[in-house]
Amino acid sequence: MTDHIDLDWFEWHRRYEPQSGSHLRRRLQVVQDLLSRTLYECRPGRIAVASLCAGQGDDLFGVLGGHRRADDVDALLVELDERNTAEIDRRAAAAGCGTVRSLRADAGDADVLSSVAPVDVLLLCGMLGNITMLDAERTIAAIPMLVRPGGTIVWTRRNVPVDQTPRLRSAFDAAGCVSVDFVAPPGDKFTVGLERFEGPGSAFEPGHRLFDFVGFPKLAALGE
Ligand SMILES: C[S@@+](CC[C@H](N)C(=O)[O-])C[C@H]1O[C@@H](n2cnc3c(N)ncnc32)[C@H](O)[C@@H]1O
């Protein structure tokens, strides 16, 4: 586990406030739109959702209110900062729909998903830009044991100082995914991808290490 303390990840969420005008606020809107569409398109019945490095769950909670499939959602949000997991729990109680559970744990350890994998929807938002590209590729390569065939992955990545999205998209292709959407607003700093995992799936492998959370300031300094 890592040194993720170079930023206050509770305060970080203030960038989502509507008045912030931040690119993260704009990114959140795109993520929520794609996630909402994804939930509508899920097969009938329970929708298993997992989020790695979930923060306060803004992506999911922003979609659940009034969504026709909200009560079908059974979500596990894995997050390390206990102030954020407390906020997830508060929001889940307030939402009064679906099932949203927080798990305070290191999401770099794939075992955190052992009870829910393979899921229908995997959220990799705000995390691929906080881990090395090698770890990002390792995480994407694990999709066959994390996501059921036909399932969906919503992911984000900043495109500064280096645009790593071509490499990430190749990794999704190699893992058996098909790009359903890729949003990269001209002149903005964020991208959002929607992938469908076409299979084949693989058995869950206990003890699988996905990534160490490094944090984007350090990665940017390393040229990633
Ligand atoms: C950039 S934020 C993204 C939050 C959320 N996914 C979003 O897009 O709004 C990264 C989050 O990862 C959390 N985090 C850092 N290291 C982690 C780890 N090893 N396991 C789980 N969460 C971690 C931080 O506390 C922070 O809330």
Image: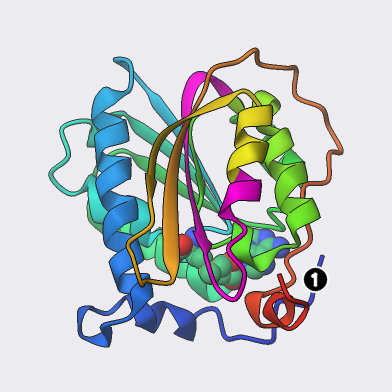
Residue occupying the far right of the picture: 207
Residue 33 point in image, percent of width and height: 25, 48
Q: Is residue 1 visible?
A: yes
Above or below for 156 versus 196 = below
Q: Quarter holding the C terminus?
A: bottom right
Please give the range of residues in magenta. Answer: 148-168
In the displayed structure, would residue 212 be above or below residue 218? above
Q: Give residue 162's quadrant in the image.
A: bottom right
Q: Residue at x 47, y 68 (%)?
A: 86
Classify residue 154 as left or right of residue 139: left
Q: Is mark 1 within 8 Å of ligand 1?
A: yes
Question: In the picture provided, is 124 more to the left or to the right than 111?
Answer: left
Three-letter amino acid code of the residue under disc 1: Thr
Side of 5 where 17 appears, left or right: left
> Which element is circle 1 on?
loop
Q: Residues within 10 Å of mark 1 (few under 14, many from 20)?
A: few
Q: Does the magenta-highlighted stretch encompass residue 194?
A: no
- Please name the residue that numbered disc 1 is placed on: 2
Left or right of 63 in this view: 192: right
Residue 2 on image: x %, y %: 80, 71
Q: Residue at x 73, y 75 (%)?
A: 223
- Determine the quadrant in which ligand 1 lies: bottom right
Residue 81 can be seen in this image: no
- Percent position of residue 67, x then y: 17, 39
